[in-house]
Image (cartoon, rainbow, N blue to C red):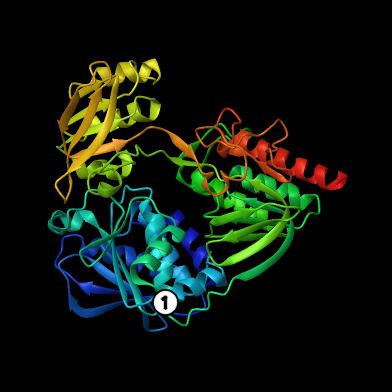
Amino acid sequence: MLDNAMIEQLKNVFSSLEGQVELVHTQSQHEKQNELLEMLNQVASTSSHIKVLQTEETTANPHFFIQHNSKANGISFTGIPGGHEFTSFILAILNSDGKGKLPDQTIIERIKALKGPIELRTFISLSCENCPDVVQALNLMSIFHAEITHEMIDGAYVQEEIEELKIQGVPSVMSGKDLVSSGKASLIDLLKKLEEKFGKNENYNSVPKDLGEFDVVVVGGGPAGASAAIYSARKGLKTALIAERIGGQVQDTKGIENLISVVYTEGPQLAAKLLEHMKAYDINILEHRLVSSVKTGDLKTLELDSGEFLKTKALIVTTGARWRELGIPGEKEYIGRGVAFCPHCDGPYYKGKDIAVVGGGNSGVEAAIDLAGIVKSVTLIEFLPELKADEVLVKKLLSLPNVKVIKNARTTQVIGNGDKVVALEYENRESQELLKLELDGVFVQIGLVPNSQFIKDVVETTKFGEIIVDFKGKTNVPGIYAAGDVTTTPFKQIIIAMGEGAKAALSAFEDQLTS
């Protein structure tokens, strides 16, 4: 199952293990059971610190859990964690032994403060690119909190249960029959949702923590943020970087072929290199955090959602952008139950069904083309009188027999029956007639929105939320700079973001020299 190259790579990965990690599988008559056992034994063969054990318990599907030094740590897998989830499996072994990339102490304390017991199950697809982030984050929480258990479940093995729970997208995190989270989510997203749902222990110390004073604080950990932090540190400035996750949107990017001098790389690899480069300098990296508020003055005060705060002479905002939502009734209510944003992740759940794609740009047309090969029918809805996508994509779309295009239409409401989406309402912009399209799912593909909410009342932004900057990356507020996709800088590209981040850092350094 694992080739020799992978086995040699795992030997190196697991060379740092110190404790004993046990992969404990149940007994099953499932046809894939031997495939699971082969994977477990091959992984165990790469380190003397990993063993495979068997319980007397019998399960319908292949299933195993992880123990560290003979004690279960709450992590389990139903199905065979191959594909994108193989990384989740390997990290679960490393993290169980306290190795690999772990949250810092402040985040660990927040995890420990959750009021348990909490039993979570994440339903995934092995082809889903967003699922591993959720699985890995919840596995970490299980390791650090004795009353949290987390099970990854490959939806392909439990179709009846998925129907019963009315799951229509992955990853879907369930607590019993309650949907806790659906779709893409970071560790901090999940932690906040669990805090809201389960609460915090009364003895949790929530006194604000002062992180000190800095010359430069960078908010955002993508290409622009990493570049700004490195340039600041190289100039001898005391630098901190605050990020929800290192890499930002780059983490979700597959092939990257236009980063000059790098013929090909992928998002997660580039994100890892950004972190590696930043760690080569004296940069205080604060991951898994969001900025709650910014107060201006000679020193800017940043309050974080973690209960921490810090002060800085210069602030560089590099928070990028996220998927844009329609903002219509029913959209938020049915996310994960018929409303989706990732055609690659959630497309398989709509096999043989009728769906709509909202958005006629390149991303929308590409999504419609991909989905047409899976679903019964695709209706693409575009607000403008003509599609905005490249001509070659439009020609391909129109050649497909199960695709219909509705132009000059404004989507007005997602309609559900309480359990799932059943229709989409839209307005014919020419006749102003309201029409209803009966369907099973809606994929929203209408572009990106800047992540500028935390600072939009502090600096000047466009009506779209982009931070307005000059040619040096300066905002209208002295001492506050911005770079990358969150700004008005044209052409949202990785290489441009890197350059703009460097420019903003050099501007901050120049201003501090002359002040």
Q: What residue do we see at 17% from left, 71% from top?
A: 59
Question: Which residue is nearer to you in this view: 357 or 212?
Answer: 212
Residue under numbered circle 1: 145
Q: Where on the picture, by quarter, is residue 474? A: top right
Residue 10 rendering spot, x and y as whole percentages: 47, 62
Q: Judging from the image, what secondary structure is the residue with disc 1 in?
A: loop
- Residue 186 at least partly seen: yes
Q: Position of residue 305 (x, y in %)?
A: 52, 62
Q: Is residue 159 above or below residue 267?
A: below
The quarter of the picture where residue 175 lies is bottom left
Q: Is residue 131 above or below residue 16?
A: above
Residue in the picture at 44% in, 64% down: 91
Q: Which amino acid, by three-letter code, is at mark 1?
A: His
Residue 499's place in the image compared with 126, above or below, is above
- Mark 1 Cα shell of 10 Å, populated few (<14), some (14-19), many (≥20): many
Residue 170's spot in the image, x, y percent?
A: 29, 51
Rendered-image quadrant of the N terminus: bottom left
Q: Determine whether 76 is above or below 265 in the image.
A: below
Q: How many marks?
A: 1
Q: Can see residue 79?
A: no
